[in-house]
Amino acid sequence: MPPERPRAPGPSGAAAQAAIAWAALAAAHVVLSGTAPRGVLRDPLLSPGARLALLALELVAQALAVALLGAGFADFPLIAYHFKQAQVMPVAWIPLAYAVAMGTDALAALALGDTYDRLGVVVMVAATLLSALFAPLVFLGGFGWAILGMVLWGIGMGAQESVMRAAVADLVASNRRASAYGIFQTGYGLCWFLGSVLMGLLYDHFLVYLIIFSVVSQILAIPIILVVARSFCPVRR
């Protein structure tokens, strides 16, 4: 019998491979570009080799957390499509639901940014726990639950637009910060796109799996965020 041909990875496998490859690329680029992150990496007792190894590990962890958050965050066009198809609300009200999310986004970014200055990146854990609940609310709930889900979706957006970017600034020296922002935002956008493709494919036939993927992907980022916060980020006083 002829040998079986290897199967091409599906959308979820491709997303995982892209996330891992991008995380490694981000770590290698920033390490070789001469960053000076804060926290444990500034311990004078660390040898240069140990410092580089820890830096690479920390950046990979941070990148994977960002990748998981992006992959599990449903894009609004898919949510709007569901609102119309399932008749969750009148079509004319769908833009109002988006306006609610954007208003929440603005307020959450302000509040979470201020909290981050006082407590550090652990505030991202609370924001992620809240935003991870948006999927079952918007895809399974009626009008009221869907609006609450859009509020939680807006909180997630606000956290990613404020806390996530501030965390990158805490981890990278000022002379390489713009490059780090570009790398992390590129990876976030790529994983958001791949996750959205997968959720779009799941929507037609496996809506429950779509919800599980969204929730689990975001929840899996939490232990990584906690490890990064405890081991590498500067302590807030």
Image (spheres, rainbow, N blue to C red):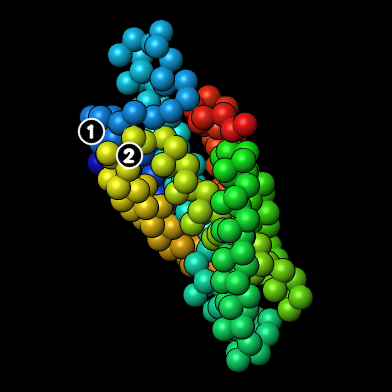
User: What residue do we see at 53% from left, 24% from top?
Assistant: 231
The residue identified by callout 1 is: 33
The one of 180 and 212 positioned closer to us in this rendering: 180
The answer to whether residue 39 shows anywhere in this view is yes
Dot 2 lies on which element? helix
Using residue 32 as the reference point, say whether residue 200 is left or right of it: right
User: In the image, which disc is placed on residue 174?
Assistant: 2
User: In the image, which disc is placed on residue 236?
Assistant: none
On the image, which quarter does residue 118 sit in? top right
Residue 163: x and y in percent read: 52, 49
User: What residue do we see at 41% from left, 35% from top?
Assistant: 171
The one of 91 and 15 positioned closer to us in this rendering: 91
Q: Residue furthest front?
A: 237
Disc 1 marks a residue whose amino acid type is Ser
Q: Nearer the viewer, mark 2 or mark 1?
A: 2
User: What residue do we see at 41% from left, 8% from top?
Assistant: 45
Q: CA distance from mark 2 to mark 1?
A: 12 Å
Q: Reply above or below: 105 against 27.
A: below
Q: Reply above or below: 40 against 17.
A: above
The answer to whether residue 219 shows anywhere in this view is no
Residue 106: x and y in percent read: 57, 66
- In the rendered structure, which disc, 2 or 1, sits on the residue that comes first in sequence? 1
Q: Reply above or below: 85 against 15.
A: below
User: What residue do we see at 43% from left, 63% from top?
Assistant: 197
Residue 128: x and y in percent read: 62, 49
Using residue 229 as the reference point, say whether residue 88 is left or right of it: right
